[in-house]
């Protein structure tokens, strides 16, 4: 098949930038990375890009296709070529470009190092017996452990674009990988560190990281898990934590968010007074609802009782998010990944494999 | 409550061409902002929905969905709060729960998937709901944003409803994040190349302006805790829409609306540039084209004046 590509060429030494178009004759099963190899072998040997494993495990070939970060070895070109589309390939965002599709990963690794990405068991001598960890306890960090450090999440992070010092989705997900690890002994220090400015409370919840991650890590959910663990451990001095706490207080007292009180509860009284002029501008438009009498939801006692009840059931912290992952994981495999096609129902398809979970249905 | 369904409902039927269409009942969850600081969203939604053939049944005893905040601070409580909302939606007998906020949409859809797919989890949550007197949730409700209804099942009637048109007004669509991503939970349209707002703008007789930041973040979730970062995010869509020649921006999310509208004054203070970009709720944009009255649109409640838009439309 004929595959067309437009590639942004760039040389940081000269500052030269150009969009070049290439066409290659590729086999039908070719990935974007295969096509780039063909461009480099047959058309232009000066094209620069990173690659290694070609099978979605080394994390080298992160780049942008039509503005969205992808792993080049994961993207099949068949449908795109058949539609006659010529995608634009460029380097990842939020990282300085060295040449063509190669970015400088140093800022990425710097942030990774900042979260202490190694196990800190905090004992001098190992116990006599083997330290056996149950599967449910490891499930807490199952998704975070899938990260291959490709940088696709970082490429599109809206908070990092606005604040280059933000630790970012990859490093914070790595942080959760150790906070949630029952063998790690530095949980509190980690949570304190990650709760500092440019840390977990700087995430703007744009969900680009979840959307882009080629491995299903869902870094935004990992950041939420860190937030939940920080709150569980009483690490809640940051304004972001206070903001989140006020939502909980609102939900169990009046049911609806007490918006007007949110500012002083988040920023403190002094900052709130500085905001008075701004607030008055909103107040004249009815955007600052008076706190008294409070807007109380009907049957709000149910909401309060629910809070008291679930607090006794030991699913606070990250466990509250982890319990939903099983269901959310199934959406991915059923809908998005297969594109609605069942590989075992076609005429020449292989027999359906036996899955232990299907035992009851087949019996 | 405050939803003049019956009165407008009667008028809708008379306006309906040739035989009319069936009226569909929807459970309606308005969320915190539309209840309080963005009342104009609730009022215009309640006025517009009957014209599109919907009867809204407002949920009485529900609470905040918790935004991203309770999901992050107390995730188990988040799931139960949303299960309670879904349960009361199911109790109305409707198969659809309509939302008018991106954040509510994501929270409710996420909780709904968890409860629908994982039976053990649903059993546990239902036990808890029953212990505090809430009916159990069987999983029969689907959560849909008003945008999806307008751009989806009622798109065919939109041109007729929007009979007054927008006179070629240049409108910049701003989607916000949590109606597009994560796409596996939303699934209505391509999260990178969405087109629902554009199609609605065109069907109402406006001209849709294209600009890259229309799918990016408005900064609202961190606007109080990290104002500087949030403003650096907020300026992008407003600046790009301005440069593309937009007369106004439209958004399906009251949180995006609040930051785009109310925080423009902070951008002015910070950058010295007065964008004066009017920001419309989706229900107001379609509402203007459908001939809703001033009392139903409530543009007076906006911080940035919408008068330039009204003037262009009245010429």
Image: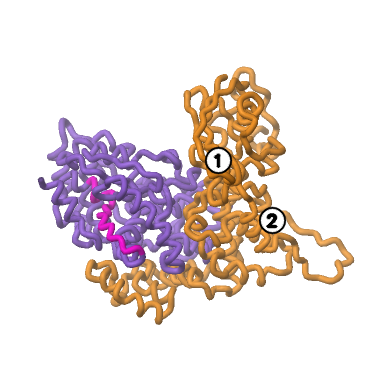
Chain colours: A orange, B purple
What residue is pinned by disc 2?
A: A136
Label 2 marks a residue whose chain is A
In the rendered image, the quadrant that contains the C terminus of chain A is: top right
Q: Position of residue A32 (x, y in %)?
A: 59, 32
- Which residue range is magenta in the image? B271-286
Residue B163, label in figure: none
Disc 2 crowd rating (10 Å Cα; few below 14, some 14-19, many 20+) is: few
Quarter of the image with the N terminus of chain A is top right
Q: Residue furthest front?
A: A14
Q: Find residue A10 and name its label.
A: 1
In the image as oriented, which residue stretches furthest toward the left?
A: B315
Q: Nearer the viewer, residue A77 or B66?
A: A77
Return the residue nearer the eye: B209 or A100: A100
Which is more foreground, mark 2 or mark 1?
1
Residue B268 location in percent, x, y? 31, 64
Task: State the SS at label 2.
Answer: helix
Is residue B284 on the magenta stretch? yes
Q: Earlier in the sequence, mark 2 or mark 1?
A: 1
Whether residue A194 is visible: yes
Residues tagged by mark 2 and mark 1 found on one chain of the structure:
yes
Residue drawn where x is 60% and y is 42% of the image: A99
């Amino acid at each position: 098949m004929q595959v067309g590509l437009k590639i942004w060429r760039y040389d940081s030494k000269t500052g030269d930038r150009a969009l070049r178009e290439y066409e290659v004759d590729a086999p039908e099963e070719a990935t974007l990375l295969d096509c780039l190899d063909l461009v480099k072998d047959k058309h232009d040997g000066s094209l620069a890009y990173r690659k290694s494993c070609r099978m979605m495990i080394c994390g080298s070939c992160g780049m942008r296709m039509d503005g969205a970060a992808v792993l080049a070895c994961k993207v099949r070109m068949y449908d795109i070529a058949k539609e006659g589309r010529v995608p634009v390939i460029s380097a990842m965002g939020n990282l300085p470009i060295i040449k063509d599709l190669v970015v400088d990963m140093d800022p990425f690794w710097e942030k990774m190092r900042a979260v202490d990405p190694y196990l800190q068991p905090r004992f001098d001598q190992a116990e006599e017996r083997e330290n056996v960890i149950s599967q449910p306890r490891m499930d807490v960090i199952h998704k975070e452990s899938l990260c291959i450090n490709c940088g696709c999440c970082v490429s599109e992070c809206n908070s990092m674009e606005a604040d280059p010092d933000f630790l970012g989705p990859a490093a914070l997900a790595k942080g959760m990988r150790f906070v949630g690890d029952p063998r790690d002994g530095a949980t509190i220090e980690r949570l304190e560190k990650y709760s500092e400015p440019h840390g977990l409370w700087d995430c703007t919840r744009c969900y680009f990281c979840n959307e882009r991650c080629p491995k299903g890590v869902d870094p935004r959910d990992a950041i939420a898990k860190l937030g939940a663990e920080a709150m569980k451990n009483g690490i809640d001095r940051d304004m972001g934590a206070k903001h989140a706490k006020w939502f909980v207080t609102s939900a169990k007292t009046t049911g609806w968010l007490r918006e007007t009180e949110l500012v002083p509860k988040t920023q403190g009284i002094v900052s709130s007074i500085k905001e008075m002029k701004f607030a008055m501008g909103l107040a004249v438009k009815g955007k600052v609802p008076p706190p008294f009498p409070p807007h109380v939801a009907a049957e709000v006692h149910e909401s309060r009782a629910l809070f008291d009840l679930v607090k006794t059931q030991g699913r606070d912290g990250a466990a509250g998010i982890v319990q939903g992952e099983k269901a959310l994981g199934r959406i991915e495999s059923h809908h998005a990944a297969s594109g609605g096609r069942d590989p075992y129902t076609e005429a020449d398809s292989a027999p359906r494999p036996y899955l232990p979970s299907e035992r009851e249905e087949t019996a | 409550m405050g939803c003049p369904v019956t009165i407008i409902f009667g008028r809708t039927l008379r306006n309906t061409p040739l035989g009319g269409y069936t009226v569909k009942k929807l459970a309606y969850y308005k969320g915190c902002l539309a209840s309080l600081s963005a009342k104009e969203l609730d009022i215009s939604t309640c006025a517009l929905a009957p014209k599109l053939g919907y009867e809204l049944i407002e949920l009485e005893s529900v609470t905040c969905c918790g935004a991203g905040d309770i999901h992050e601070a107390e995730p188990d409580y988040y799931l139960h709060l949303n299960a309670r909302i879904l349960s009361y939606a199911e109790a109305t007998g409707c198969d659809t729960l309509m939302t008018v906020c991106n954040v509510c949409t994501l929270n409710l859809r996420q909780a709904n998937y968890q409860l629908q797919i994982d039976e053990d989890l649903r059993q546990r949550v239902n036990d808890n709901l029953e212990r505090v007197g809430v009916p159990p949730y069987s999983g029969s409700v689907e959560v849909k944003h008003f945008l999806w209804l307008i751009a989806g099942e009622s798109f065919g009637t939109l041109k007729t409803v929007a009979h007054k048109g927008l006179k070629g007004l240049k409108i910049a669509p701003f989607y916000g994040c949590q109606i597009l991503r994560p796409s596996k939970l939303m699934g209505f349209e391509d999260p990178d190349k969405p087109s629902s707002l554009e199609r609605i703008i065109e069907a109402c007789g406006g001209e849709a302006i294209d600009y890259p930041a229309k799918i990016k973040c408005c900064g609202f979730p961190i606007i109080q805790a990290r104002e500087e970062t949030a403003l650096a995010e907020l300026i992008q869509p407003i600046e790009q829409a301005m440069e593309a020649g937009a007369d106004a921006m439209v958004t399906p999310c009251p949180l995006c609306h609040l930051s785009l509208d109310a925080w423009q004054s902070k951008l002015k203070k910070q950058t010295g540039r007065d964008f004066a970009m009017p920001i419309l709720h989706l229900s107001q944009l379609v509402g203007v084209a459908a001939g809703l009255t001033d009392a139903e649109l409530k543009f007076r409640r906006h911080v940035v004046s919408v008068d330039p838009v009204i003037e262009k439309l009245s010429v």
